[in-house]
Image (tube, helix red, strand yellow):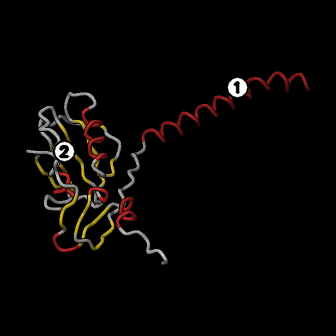
């Protein structure tokens, strides 16, 4: 009796391991072939303000040209002007000139960033997170060091990214 059990133990174990391997392959394929889960950006927070400063604006610079490191250099220049910056990266497609992208073309944050890029084009994409993107191409027009770091806010309200909104209105402190 023991001998027949030993005779079948190896093939049964092998079949169980092959079944486990097959299940693992099936599960892995299911995970790889499912649609990517995109986490939407947090919406901006509306604040009353008469002036918007560079410290309240979040900018991401993207390189759309062939000049290596350009987005990193511009990110550093914007950071030196007080902007909150996201890590620089490359775009998916090429762009020749400089493009500033925000929720609307007349948004104060977009206009403030636009002042640093002479001759840049403005695009609006209806974003709700309050950030501004700068796409730089091979015909980058330069960085305006003399641009102002604050701008008036028409209407008295501004929508700021959640991460910088806490900087915009600090909690009151007891005297």
The spot of residue 129 in percent (x, y) is 30, 59
Q: Quadrant of residue 165?
A: bottom left
Classify 169 as above or below 101.
below
| Picture residue at 24% right of the left edge, 36% below the top | 63
- Crowdedness of circle 1 by 10 Å Cα count: few (<14), some, many (20+)? few
Q: Would residue 57 be found to the left or right of residue 123 on screen?
A: right
Taking the view exactly as shown, the residue that stands out farthest to the right is 1
Q: Secondary structure at mark 2?
A: loop
**Residue at the disc numbered 2:** 145
Estimate the x, y position of residue 145 in percent, counting from the top left. 18, 45
**Residue 119: % across, % down:** 8, 45
Q: Is the residue 90 above or below the residue 168 in the image?
A: above
Residue on which the image places disc 1: 14
Left or right of 45 in this view: 115: left
* Residue 90 seen in this snapshot: no
44 or 79: nearer the eye? Answer: 79
Residue 150 coordinates in the image, percent (x, y): 22, 59
| Distance from Cα at disc 2 to Cα at disc 1 | 70 Å
Q: Secondary structure at mark 1?
A: helix
How packed mark 2 is, by other alpha carbons closer than 10 Å (few <14, some 14-19, many 20 or more), is: few
Can residue 48 be spotted in the picture? yes
- In front: mark 2 or mark 1? 2
Mark 2 or mark 1: name the one nearer the start of the chain.
Answer: 1
The residue sitting at 15% across, 31% down in the picture is 138
Give the residue furthest to the front. 175
Residue visible at 64% across and 34% down in the picture: 20
What's the mark number on residue 138? none
């Amino acid at each position: 009796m023991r001998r027949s059990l030993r005779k079948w133990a190896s093939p049964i174990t092998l079949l169980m391991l092959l079944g486990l391997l097959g299940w693992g392959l099936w599960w892995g394929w299911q995970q790889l072939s499912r649609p990517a889960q995109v986490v939407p950006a947090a919406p901006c927070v509306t604040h009353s303000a008469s002036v918007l400063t560079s410290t309240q604006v979040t900018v991401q610079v993207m390189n759309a040209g062939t000049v290596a490191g350009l987005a990193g250099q511009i990110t550093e220049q914007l950071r030196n002007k007080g902007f909150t910056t996201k890590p620089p990266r490359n775009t998916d497609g090429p762009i020749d000139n400089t493009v500033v992208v925000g929720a609307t073309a007349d948004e104060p944050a977009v206009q403030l960033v636009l002042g640093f890029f002479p001759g840049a084009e403005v695009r609006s994409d209806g974003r709700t997170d309050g950030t501004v993107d700068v796409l730089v191409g091979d015909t980058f027009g330069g960085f305006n060091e003399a641009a102002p770091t604050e701008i008036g806010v028409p209407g008295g309200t501004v929508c700021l990214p959640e991460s910088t909104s806490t900087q915009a209105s600090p909690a009151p402190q007891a005297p």
